[in-house]
Amino acid sequence: MDSNTLYYSLDLVSGSGLTLSSEQKAALQTSLVILKRNNKFNRILFWGKILGIKGDYFIAQGVSEDEMTDKKSLYSFNCVDWHLLPPATEAMLAEVSAAAKGRFVGDPSHEYEHTEIRRQGEGDEAVEEEIMIKVKEEKRLASTVHTIDKEVSVVPRGAFIKSPHGLVQTNRSFEGLSSLEAGKLSCFLHFTEPQKLKKKSILEMADLNPSIDFLDPLSEDIPKGSWSLQFERGSTVCVIRSMLWLGLTFFHVPMTPQHGYIYMGDGLKNLDLPFML
Amino acid sequence: MESEGALNNQRELTSICFKAFMLKNSTKSNLNLYDHFARVLTKVMDERPENVVDVIEDMSREVKRGLLMDKQSTLRDIPLAPAAQLLAEQQRLLFSRGGGDDGDQEVETPLPNVSEVGFFLEQAGVGLGREEMLRVFLALKQLVDSQPLARCRLWGKILGTEGNYLVAEGEYRDGEEEEGINEETAEDAEGEPRDDDEEAEVVEVIDTLPRSTFKPPPVVPKEDNRTGVNKFTYFVCREPGLPWMRLPTVTPTQITAARNIRKFFTGRLDTPIVSYPPFPGNEANYLRAQIARISAGTQVSPLGFYQFGEEEGEEEEEGGRDSFEENPDFEGIPVPEMAESLSTWVHHVQHILQQGRCVWVNLAEKPEDDFEEEADEEGKEEADEPEPEVGPPLLTPLSEDAEITTTPPWSSKMSSTLISQFAIAVLRSNLWPGAYAYASGKKFENIYFGWGLKFAGEVYTPTVPSMPQREYTSGPEITEALDSSLEEEQALKAALEEQKAAQDETAGLGGDEEEEDDD
């Protein structure tokens, strides 16, 4: 969520139970401004909090020109000193998924070890090699943040437009969804490269506006029911929670341009989802 | 001069024509271009936005949309979503003072100090936001006014897919409890043989249908109200302001079933739980079972806050102590100590045994009416005596808690490192994510905000369905026999006639008769 609106948006997502203490909020408001100026970001967002066993990580993201691809993530323990996270590559994602299991420890230099026995050669000449994969928690953090953004980041339809040059930018004339639209999951889109959009038939694409509808809507996610849409606070805020990554909360106040999402949880994907619905 | 005048006239004529053209109303929307441009330019003049030329199309569309909406609103009011309105009305009641409040200041109120709890929780980074917490506490006050409770406490909030539950824990005053709820019991497998008997009678079959030899394991009896798992009564509501509903008491079968399934809550108390192994009850029962498990696992207090009563001189062998009282001499443990070591915290809710109860019950004791079975099993009873299940006694420190694979069961920290003199100690459970406890001097509180699920450490594997039963035991009654063919029957008939003839001839001899069996 945008750091400018942090102080009131945090109340809107607190329905999940986790919030920030007043000390942390105050520290964030100061340090995010400094961070924005030092790194020359266009906008800076407070992404959320990942709970570890010994300590918690606070994550912030800075956005430059293109809202979708030009993102840099930073982490901190006390909301004052921030460190840059390495950008997540395919190789890093593969390493992390093989080696890192269980909860986050809370120490960025902690190493997860995983030994794999690989056979090289064929038949009788097979030689077994024990390959040890070591992954630092920092890399695990970077790939978790990247994966969560890729899988469950949410924006309302119309909030971002794609310019003819391909740049994704905020839509300044976005006035919010109406209360009726805010009750439908199809009006909310994943904020990442679309996967299902190109497979749509021309008939379906006829109703879409290419500058707004360049993302996948939430209603097409499998399994159905992996999103929970509710109106909270006396039906003034529309809150969407993900069941796949427990802890991701998106809020939108209908008829206003206020929207944002935050992740506050332990950073583990809920693989039991199909059994739980 | 004339030509100029004529030119001007022509220009004027053209411009008047063009203006007339612009004033022509569109057939579709009854607007005309002239008025529309006038409105758009007025808007630009009033608002003076940045980079107007980039956003002019959007502004034009806004103006058009604005016109249409105005026309609609003169015909009928745009209704506020009815759900929102109902909720707002009900929440308004929260803010009105009930009658008879004047005398309340002297009577001890069962509510805790609400704003203080909210404040401490906020320091710990947990909570619903200030206004929502206030609404929740007003709703608690409403509950206390409507039910005769001796004590009441906010237990927490459980999230669901379509709605959430706010849970309050209460203890009725002595003698005030009502048994209002009909608890539905699950249908046992014992229903089946009975049905078969009825069918058999109706059809009048000579062979009775085989009786099933399946005896379901004896049902563990439920604990009484105010003891063990059912010590407190729980109330839930969807949003503060909506009526509170009382949850039924929990049975041990429900607890053991809840341990084997993993399901999200939906937010409606009457949803059936479709799962394997089948859960005996609906969502209200499942919710109550999870609340019982969470309370047993995560309700903690500082060491020394509670102590055992002085009446029992010796430790009892069965069950252990299950009652405690507040220690009036409790001095409070310094916060840094509480945040560092887990042995300064103790559980104050009884552990739930494998059986699903807090106090173990011996199921091997048969009731006194089945004399036949007793005679058979006398020899077996001593051998099969199940071992009593023992759990950790009440008020054990948290350092004795077991780890889940490699994760420690609790994480603790101070709420603030900058102002550590006034910080509080915060404890977070890793076994039940969402359970928190804080302590500061003599004050402490437990709360739960989460989905109501346990952290298993590994991926959930559902129980495999049981193996299908073997076929019915084969015996002579049901083994198939081949029907004899025509030749064989004729041969048998011929053989019998021969024998009969032989018999008649040798009537007095009384030879052996051989009977040939057909197999």
Image (spheres, helix red, strand yellow):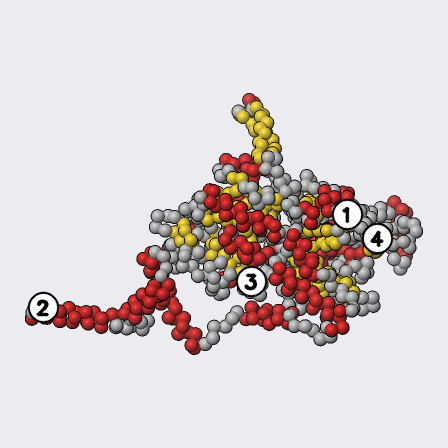
* Total marks in image: 4
The first of marks 1 and 2 along the sequence is: 2
Q: Which mark is residue A231?
A: 3
- Residue at left 43%, top 57%? A158
- Residue at left 68%, top 72%? B97
Crowd around label 3: few <14 · some 14–19 · many ≥20 (10 Å): many
Tell me the kind of residue under disc 4.
Asp
- Residue at left 88%, top 45%? B383
Q: Which mark is residue B333?
A: 1
The first of marks 2 and 4 along the sequence is: 2
> What is the C-alpha distance between the residues marked 2 and 3?
71 Å
Q: Which of the two residues, B377 or B17, is positioned nearer the viewer here?
A: B17
Mark 2 chain: B
- For this view, does A52 lie left or right of residue A260? right
The residue that mark 4 highlights is B329
The residue that mark 2 highlights is B4
The residue most toward the left is B2
> What is the C-alpha distance between the residues marked 1 and 4?
12 Å
Q: Please, what secondary structure does the residue beneath circle 3 have?
A: strand
Examine the rendering and report whether any part of residue B488 can be seen: no
Mark 4 chain: B
Tell me the kind of residue under disc 3.
Phe
Number of the front mark, 4 or 3: 4
Number of the front mark, 2 or 3: 2
Mark 3 chain: A
- For this view, does B39 lie left or right of residue B169? left
Tell me the kind of residue under disc 2.
Glu
Q: Which mark is residue B476?
A: none
